[in-house]
Amino acid sequence: MSEDPSVAVDVFEVGGEHEQVVFCNDAASGLRAIVAIHSTALGPALGGTRFYPYASTADAVHDVLNLSRAMSYKNALAGLDLGGGKAVIVGDPARDKTESLLRAYGRFVQALNGRYLTACDVGTYSEDMDLIARECDFVTGRTTAHGGAGDSSVLTAYGVFQGMRASAEAAWGQPTLSGRTVGVEGVGKVGHHLVRHLVDDGARVVVTDVNPAAADAMVREYGATAVADSAALVRADIDVFAPCAMGGALTDEVVETLTATIVCGAANNQLAHPGIEKALADRGVLYAPDFCVNSGGVIQVADELEGFSFERAEQRAGGIFETTKAVLALAESDAVTPAEAADLLAERRMRDVGRLRGLYLRG
């Protein structure tokens, strides 16, 4: 990882509220990773490991700090006794992911002694968690063969669908997408499952993906309509826009051209910059905060800590419907945006329930 001194400035200026940021380098395996622990006020920090070819160390730092902060809020709002953390591995998973690299990463996570619990994210899978677990005790999202929850995208999509139903009730009076047109940006692990829920509910679906084969699969399997790119999707005649790819999908340009009444999707950190949530509200667009509706995955992997039960985890993820309703109700009653309302509810729980001592230390 580069020794650019500006990176250190980024850590302290952008991530000053974080408890701990750890740079992990292992020359033998080629591992370059960063673990960011935002808060352990509610318990050990749980969040996935993203494997992504960042253009620079500064980009990786910026992403892991934003993602880990979002996990604190997501876990708090989901009612979990867990703090927020995240990790990124710098590299192309298709080319750079090896057993030795993942096991080296596991040793670094183990060294944090339970302050950070890892799981899957973009570029990592349950099989990868099994490899990491050969060196580490603090791994969730493992395969079902190893007693884990398996693919967390299943309940991530289910939770987003529940959040979308709650948003539909707020906007149109009925908790259903039947007869509505939903545009899904990104139909990978989560987007694929979301499309199935939407079609089963009677929605029409328009999709786009940087991988044309993924979009074509939705056309074949579910009768979806595919468009060329994200710009075409947001300009299409849709009722709901569901960002399910990388973060920053809601830019000023997107807000200006968006036709949808509701934004509700699985992607993390959807708002490109502060103020976008107000621009959406000014245009009459109802925004379901991402960390509220996409918490089904973390609910799923957190259930492993009790001995995994899919039925129990699914029931808990179904609670995202009521949580989203509470967020939207608070936004209306307090005349704030849904994003501000979600922050308020999460911060209230971290303050009221959080440990009086600052740091979580195992044992």
Image: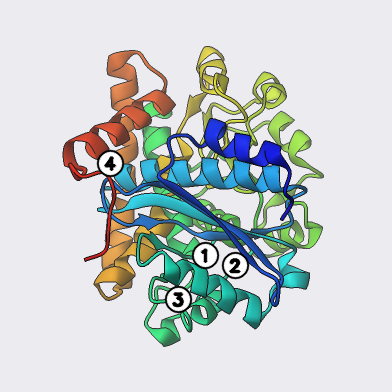
Density class for disc 1 (Cα within 10 Å; few <14, some 14-19, many ≥20) is: many
Q: Which mark is residue 322?
A: 4
The one of 345 and 312 positioned closer to us in this rendering: 345
Q: Which mark is residue 142?
A: 3
Residue that numbered label 2 is attached to: 124
- Circles 2 and 1 in contact, beta carbons < 8 Å: yes
Residue 324, by quadrant, is top left
* Secondary structure of the residue carrying numbered label 4: helix
Residue 27, by quadrant, is bottom right
* Residue reaching furthest to the bottom: 145
Query: In the image, what residue type sits under mark 2?
Result: Thr
In percent of the image, x 66 and y 25: which residue is there?
Answer: 258
Can residue 268 be seen in this snapshot? no
Q: On the rendered image, what quadrant is the N terminus found in?
A: bottom right
- Circles 1 and 4 in contact, beta carbons < 8 Å: no
Cα separation, mark 1 vs mark 4, equals: 26 Å
Residue 78: x %, y % from top left: 31, 47
The relative height of residue 301 versus residue 170 in the rendered view (above or below) is below
Query: In the image, what residue type sits under mark 3?
Result: Arg
Cα separation, mark 2 vs mark 3, equals: 11 Å
Cα separation, mark 2 vs mark 4, equals: 30 Å
Residue 208: x %, y % from top left: 73, 48
Can residue 197 be seen in this snapshot? yes
The one of 267 and 68 positioned closer to us in this rendering: 68
Query: In the image, what residue type sits under mark 1?
Result: Cys
The one of 298 and 38 positioned closer to us in this rendering: 38
Density class for disc 2 (Cα within 10 Å; few <14, some 14-19, many ≥20) is: some
Q: Which mark is residue 36?
A: none
Cα separation, mark 3 vs mark 1, equals: 8 Å
Of the residues under marks 1 and 4, which one precedes in the sequence? Answer: 1
